Amino acid sequence: MAERRRLDQPRESRITLPRFDPEAFGQWSEGIARFMGTAKFLVYMTIVILAWIAWNTLTPRSWQFDPYTFTFLTLILSLQASYAAPLILLAQNRQADRDRLASEEDRRRAAAQKADTEYLAREIAALRIALGEVATRDFLRSELARVAEELDEAADRRAKAERKKVRKALGSLSDPLNPGDEPDDSVDSDSSDDPPRRRR
């Protein structure tokens, strides 16, 4: 059973048009449009038109192929204008497509850079918060000075305790007949002074 053709679909065309590469045709049209937009093209076209007019007005009538009113020249210029406009529009469309792709790439790069910047800002903020809990150089200096003072005080206390032990030992070795005599402090005269404090 033959498949029924749907009425909402267009009938396939039986005319086959020649195939061409749109990219190659677009590059060719852009080349023509760029050349037509140069001063060289204007100079060449002016020379050709002046030569055309001079040939068809100054030469004998039998040599003239486009006599006055220059109908053939008008036709050629009209054809040139009719083809130049679509070629220029095609070149502009291709340029617009390139500009759109470039702008999309710029937006993508800008979004990536913004994301990277936000990430770096978050990392810097985290580092600042972490550094806020780290001891600073001044704090460490003050703590070390305090510990050094405490060590010096402890050394002073140990020295005083040692001097007391020495005095007691000297007192026990003194004359047993005179237990009340005090030991000679001349031996301990140097040790009675406080030991020099350690330089910080």
Image: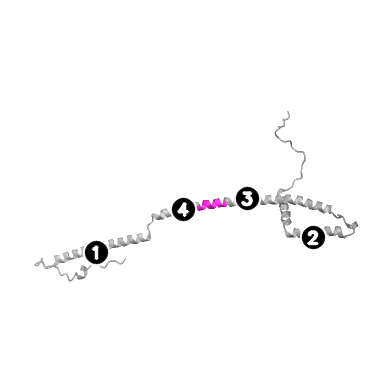
Crowd rating for badge 2 (residues with CA inside 10 Å; few <14, some 14–19, many 20+) = few
Task: Give the residue at mark 3.
Answer: 101
Q: Nearer the viewer, mark 4 or mark 1?
A: 4
- In the rendered structure, the answer to whether residue 70 lies left or right of residue 125 reads right
Crowd rating for badge 1 (residues with CA inside 10 Å; few <14, some 14–19, many 20+) = some
Q: Quadrant of residue 165?
A: bottom left
Q: Distance of mark 2 from mark 3, alpha carbons? A: 40 Å
Task: Give the residue at mark 4.
Answer: 123
Q: Distance of mark 2 from mark 4, alpha carbons? A: 69 Å
Crowd rating for badge 3 (residues with CA inside 10 Å; few <14, some 14–19, many 20+) = few
Task: Give the residue at mark 2.
Answer: 47
Residue name at image x 33 percent, y 61 percent: 142
**Disc on the earlier residue, 2 or 4:** 2
In the image, residue 56 above or below residue 16? below
Task: Give the residue at mark 1.
Answer: 156
**Disc on the earlier residue, 2 or 3:** 2
**Disc on the earlier residue, 1 or 3:** 3
Residue name at image x 89 percent, y 57 percent: 63
In terms of secondary structure, where does tag 4 sit? Answer: helix
Type of amino acid at the residue the image marks with label 3: Leu
Where is residue 102 drawn, in percent x and y?
62, 52
> Bounds of the magenta span?
108-117
Front residue of 61 and 198: 61
Type of amino acid at the residue the image marks with label 1: Asp
**Disc on the earlier residue, 4 or 1:** 4
Toward the front, the furthest residue is 69
- In the rendered structure, the answer to whether residue 171 lies left or right of residue 80 reads left
